[in-house]
Image (cartoon, rainbow, N blue to C red):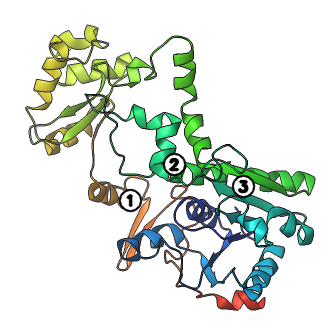
Amino acid sequence: MLHGIVVVDFSQYLPGPFASWRLAQLGAEVIKIEPPSGDRLRPFAEGRLFAAYNAGKKSAALDLKTDEGREQAQRLAARADVVIESFRPGVMARLGLGYDDVRRDNEGIIYCSISGFGQQSGRSLLGSHDLNYMALSGLLAQLADERGRPVHPKVTLADFIGGMAAAERIVAALFARERTGKGDYLDVSLVDGLTAMMAGHFAIAHGGGSKNGLAELAGEVVCYQLYETKDGRYISLAALEPHFWRQFCEAVGRPEWIEAQWASAEPGEEVYEGLAALFREKTFSEWSAFAETVDACLAPVLETDEAKQLFADDRLRHLVRLQPDGVWTAAHGPDGQWGSGTAPQVNEHAYLLKGEE
């Protein structure tokens, strides 16, 4: 889809590289600009995290603190279709690599700046990380335990959602350029996507409703709930539609529950207690097998290794490919551009700095 599009990516860590990884899987040529010491993400998890989100890219090492490094970066940006950067606001301009600088030599450039709070907000220059963005957006408060205490996420949602938002806007800007011939500047903040996700919650609360969104989706009813199994694992039940709930109740031999679909999921509530006891009668494996035979929106809560194996199977989308040297995951479904599945070494493609293809 994006064959022939050249992306020069100055970003490090996760949000920007996740965005350019998604573009690479759509066929774009992504040139990753790293400091001579490499992206600061490289050392984590013995390099596996870096490899996961930088596969299929090229690497060129530049010291942007030197005149030579900046000149080489300018030459690369001059022939690019897209530039991605995630420095603090103002840094690229001070280096002579800001949007106005690049646009002078490349009027059609799509220039995407990714930051925590945008380029000109009241918090633009404050340092923050994923947990902070989730906290401020209101999203973290939605991930709470029974006592209302926020649960620490094990996935950096702001980074990934922000990266997806950046890739989305870049693709839209490329489409617009095809129509108008004009490039664009994209100011993407990591709170943008999180705030958009909270739009429904904001609207409900503003109208005097719950701060937790729809009760039907917030763990307050028996038909949309997590239940513990005999061996301490969990199964998700999401039978919102009446026919799914009916099929579930009939399959477990409890037709008397059909009329209680929206009963409260509270201790002491008869149907909820009955469901909790029912799920504790069988093991995780038994319920997982049951979920494959009954069309009732029932699914096991898988651990990382289990999910990896599931999606490496040809029977279900085949989104993961297991290789001797790592794992290659599809960003856009099985129809995406899988590429080689390998991440570049630092400065592996130094020839690009000489203008060679």
- Mark 1 or 3: the one toward you: 3
The answer to whether 287 is drawn above or below residue 351 in the figure is above
Q: Mark 2 vs mark 3: which is more N-terminal?
A: 2
Residue 158, labelled with which disc? 2
Instruction: Identify the image quadrant of the C terminus.
Output: bottom right
User: Is 314 positioned to the left or the right of 265 in the image?
Assistant: right
Give the camera-side residue of 95 and 231. 95
Q: What residue type is disc 2 on?
A: Ala
Give the camera-side residue of 133 and 281. 133
Q: Residues within 10 Å of mark 2 (few under 14, many from 20)?
A: many
Residue 220 showing in the rendered view: yes
Q: What residue type is disc 3 on?
A: Ile
Instruction: Identify the image quadrant of the N terminus.
Output: bottom right
Distance between mark 2 and mark 1 Cα atoms: 31 Å
**Element under label 3?**
helix
- Residue labelled with disc 1: 314
Q: Residues within 10 Å of mark 3 (few under 14, many from 20)?
A: many
In the image, residue 238 lies at what x, y percent?
A: 34, 28
Q: Mark 2 vs mark 1: which is more N-terminal?
A: 2
In the image, residue 294 lies at what x, y percent?
A: 27, 32
In the image, residue 51 lies at what x, y percent?
A: 46, 73
- Residue labelled with disc 3: 170
